[in-house]
Image: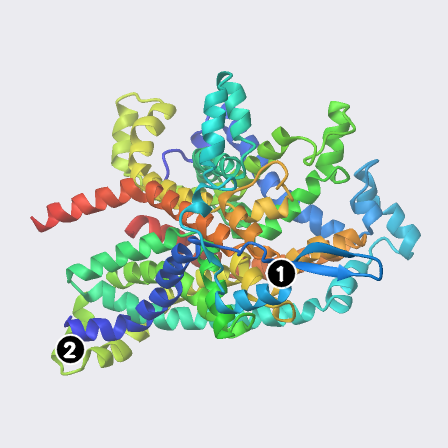
Amino acid sequence: MPHRTFFAFLFPSILAMVLFITLPILSVVVQSLYHQPDAILTVVENCDPFSCTKSTKVDTAAMAAFKAEHPMGQFAGLDNYTNHNHLALADLGQIWAEGGGLGAMASKLMNLPFYRALAFTLTYCFLVTPFAMALGFCIALAVNTLNPLLKGPAIFVSILPMIITPLVGSLIVAWMFNPQGIIGATLQALTGDPKLSLRASPVLTWIVLLGYGIWTNGPFSFVVFYAGLQSVPQDTVESARIDGASRWEIIRFVTIPHLAPLATFVALVQLMDNFRVFEPVVGFSAEANATSLSWLVFNDLVSQDSQQFGSAGATSVLTIAGVLVLLAPVLVRTWRDFNRKVV
Amino acid sequence: MANSTPTRLPLSLRALTTGFLCLWLLAAVFPFAWTVWGSFKVEADFFSRQSWWFAIEGIRTQMQTGGAFTLNGYEGAWIKNDFLHAAINTLIVTLSVTAISLTLGTMGGYALARSGHRYAFWILIAALIFRAMPHITLVSGYLLPFFQLNIWGYLPTTIIVLVAINQPFTLWMLHSFFLSIPKDLDESALVDGCTRFQAFRMVIIPVMWPGVITTGLFSFLLGYNDFAVTSMLLRQENQTMIPKIGSFLGSIQNEGNIMFAVAAVVSATVPLFLLVLFFQRQIVSGLTAGAVKG
């Protein structure tokens, strides 16, 4: 296909992606170098008949003028990245200097907003992905043994947790875990602890959020693995059986190797999706106990009058860096494959 | 077929898989069933500290409304809180996003599938990276420019943004779909004297519908399910259903009208149920197409 035709066909797509994906990323980088201006103070003299007092006030007029002139705020350099709410280098230094054992240092680290969010995001990403894949694989094996008539309904029910709007799904589950909801109340009765609730217990919050993640991510692996199972070479299975392989050995040495390429794909997609975990934190109102990187950005932007563009920008850039690190193995491999193909 | 036909499974294994499957299916469907059922009850029944049995029997629903089921929640959401308006906005947004995404995506995907040039590969890799960007990080880049251009808060802005965010995925999916259409088909049209565009219009468009429908379903889901973009880019009166539900959380929950939110959530789930019901085959094949070919 000649270059001209190619770009004529692709131009609208590329334009959309450049305007609304590339430029915003640049804009985020620039934004992250600015912060909201410090309050401009003026000294006002208030005189009453007896005396004059001087007081300092925020000069709203000057602030508005400054804001109109510099919509992004004041240039801050890398301050947004290093301050307490992000990488918190000063706090890190202090924690390091104080020492006191790994546990104490970790708990101090978890008080810093960015590291708290990072810890949850990574835990979510790297626990939910493998467990959801294992769950999906088991469902696929089980559904595959079903009577053909039952397969359709079983697949229908199984993909519901995946297709559901993330916010809606997390709300539905969160309401059940509400202290007044069916599971929340039952948990309190079972443990005999009337104060047990998501809000009160960080451990429970993490477990429920991870469980929700596995519930909603499992079906995707299931569908892909189920399709993969349909193409397992029957000759190999047959010969393995004749050689005396047990059911488990057939799964271990024939089925799983056959599904391995699919598993890489599923893992990649799920890691990307789980890294941006966001709606569950909102749906479960879990921000007191578990936050994610995406939620931090959202939280900076959500208040209508005092949006922290600089801070949101810095978190966004750090998140994007995280995505690139996550994708790096794939990119390196593609690059190698590509070069090999050319040579 | 599979490595084990139902009859050949030993009884213990049969029991294990059946038990596991029943457990999973229950876990998959119960939250929905429970919430749908509960949405027709009053709050004192659905959120009852004493016993979840209240929600089943609906004693307080009976006491407060005189019937075992009540539509109070739905009335509150749809009539008092103008959920209808949000539903219409959702309809506009999702249909436009799907239509525009597919129009751009089929052309782009076709070009990517038929171009042997190096840059086609790099565009696909760039699309893969874009696909991984958390949406909210992009949103934080939109806000300031949109404020300045004075286009923040309107439906068309959100539609275009969702189309763009959706583009990498659409391109990948349609690219791999077009790869499965034999090259000879459109090349013979070229030999017969068609231009590329004519070949696309007269030869490719008639055979591309299975792939387009599948991709369209996923574009629809993206527009429908989005919360990050719609909640940040739409002003209150233009909100679609999902951000509307999000805003219910703060306001309505505090006023003791949580059942409005429950009813709204159930209402927003219904279209998805219907979608899966009618398009299960396409959704399944779409998910696997990405895996098998991509």
Residue A323: quarter of image: top left
Residue A132 against residue B191 in the figure, above or below: above
Residue A63 against residue A174 in the figure, above or below: below
Per the image, the residue denoted by label 2 is B190
Residue B6 showing in the rendered view: no
Disc 2: CA contacts within 10 A as few (<14), some (14-19) or many (>=20): some
Quarter of the picture containing the N terminus of chain A is: bottom left
Q: Position of residue B26 (x, y in %)?
A: 61, 39
Disc 1: CA contacts within 10 A as few (<14), some (14-19) or many (>=20): few
Mark 2 lies on a secondary structure that is helix
The Cα–Cα distance between marks 2 and 1, rounded to whole angstroms, is 58 Å
In this picture the colour scheme is rainbow
Q: Residue at x 32, y 73 (%)?
A: A12
Residue A78 showing in the rendered view: yes
Amino acid under disc 1: Asp
Give whichever of B6, A5 is nearer the camera. A5
Q: Residue at x 20, y 71 (%)?
A: B185
Residue B211: quarter of image: bottom left
Q: Position of residue A93 (x, y in %)?
A: 45, 28
Work out which residue is located at the far front of the displayed protein and give it: A50
Q: Chain under label 1? A: A
Per the image, the residue denoted by label 1 is A305
- Report whether B112 appears left or right of B13: left
| Nearer to us: label 2 or label 1 | 1
Amino acid under disc 2: Leu
Mark 1 lies on a secondary structure that is loop
Q: Residue at x 53, y 50 (%)?
A: A156
Give whichever of A184, A34 is nearer the camera. A34
Q: Position of residue B215 (x, y in %)?
A: 40, 62
